[in-house]
Image (tube, grey):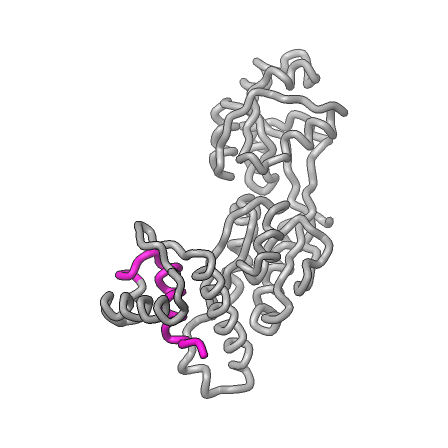
Amino acid sequence: MLDYAQLATLAAVIRTGSFERAAQHLNVTPSAISQRIKLLEERLGVVLVVRGQPCTATEVGQRLCQHVEQVALLEGSLRGSLPGLQAESRPVTLRIAVNADSLATWFISAMAKTDGYLFDLVLDDEDHSADWLRRGEVVAGVTGHSTPIQGCDCHPLGALRYVATANPEYCARWFADGFSELAAARAPCLIFNQKDRLQAEWLRQVLGVDVHPPLHWLPSSQAFVDAALAGIGWGMNPEPLVIDHLRAGRLVALQPDQPLDVPLFWQQSRIVSTVLCHVTQAVVHEAKRMLVPG
């Protein structure tokens, strides 16, 4: 049998990144943390923690952390029927994958409508967050995949609308003769990271061809807006982040009649659906309020 006190210690070390912070979290001494990890590693015959700043998990260590978190979630699902468990239980930590633009526009509001949970958010592109669910590293995620992942329930959320935006001076400089393939190939463009295909998809939608503009790499939703305001480049910005700037004329839409709508879905592990029901309700409700119909 696994020693769940030792497993909880392992999870605390990996989550906090150090033996000292794990000791504070569990109200024990750092030496006690070290002893528990040592005993667990000796019993299993494998290294579980890579000591460093921060401490990280080996592959086996990560699997054990996932296991103990799933056990905690399953215990959380019993709280309604076992009142005696309430006083003994810590708040349930939910590890969720979410894309940066959802986090910057509507997901925080959904989190605020829940109570009794702690959140451990993993940032990834909506086309890749499903991989976290497949690996069992998160219990739910905002994803672009409409087909339910094995073991998950899928809820449509609506679409996050993106608008190609730049400031007026930038448009006057680069698109003085209109938005064309030639102009788009020369005008500096903003891109989030290697997984970001929004700008390329929009250019193909508008111009009908693949265009490869010079790129600024900015891995931040707010930096995208700030860079567009500063005239550094044009980019696909979520409409909720730029609507006030568009109305005030600080930004303009390159093609006002051609936004790009990205459908989003909430996928959650079916095995812990009871624990996640209130979170799912909050996510679906807030998404319907903030997103356009899918």
As drawn, is 25 to the left or to the right of 240? left
In magenta, the rendered stretch is 1-21
Location of residue 209 (image quadrant):
top right
Nearer the observer, 259 or 75? 75
Residue 184 position within the rendered picture, expressed as x and y whole percent measured from the top left: 64, 19
Q: Residue at position x 62%, y 52% from top?
A: 130
Task: From this view, report whether residue 78 is shown above or below residue 34.
Answer: below
Magenta span dominant secondary structure: helix
Residue 77 position within the rendered picture, expressed as x and y whole percent measured from the top left: 55, 77
Of the 4 image quadrants, the one containing the N terminus is bottom left
Task: From this view, report whether residue 30 is shown above or below residue 130.
Answer: below
Nearer the observer, 213 or 49? 49
Residue 129 position within the rendered picture, expressed as x and y whole percent measured from the top left: 59, 50
Location of residue 65 (image quadrant):
bottom left
Q: Residue at position x 31%, y 57% from top?
A: 18
Q: Residue at position x 69%, y 51% from top?
A: 145
Task: From this view, report whether residue 85 is shown above or below residue 227.
Answer: below
- Residue 185 in the magenta stretch? The answer is no
Q: Residue at position x 66%, y 41% from top?
A: 161
- The residue lying furthest to the top in this view is 177
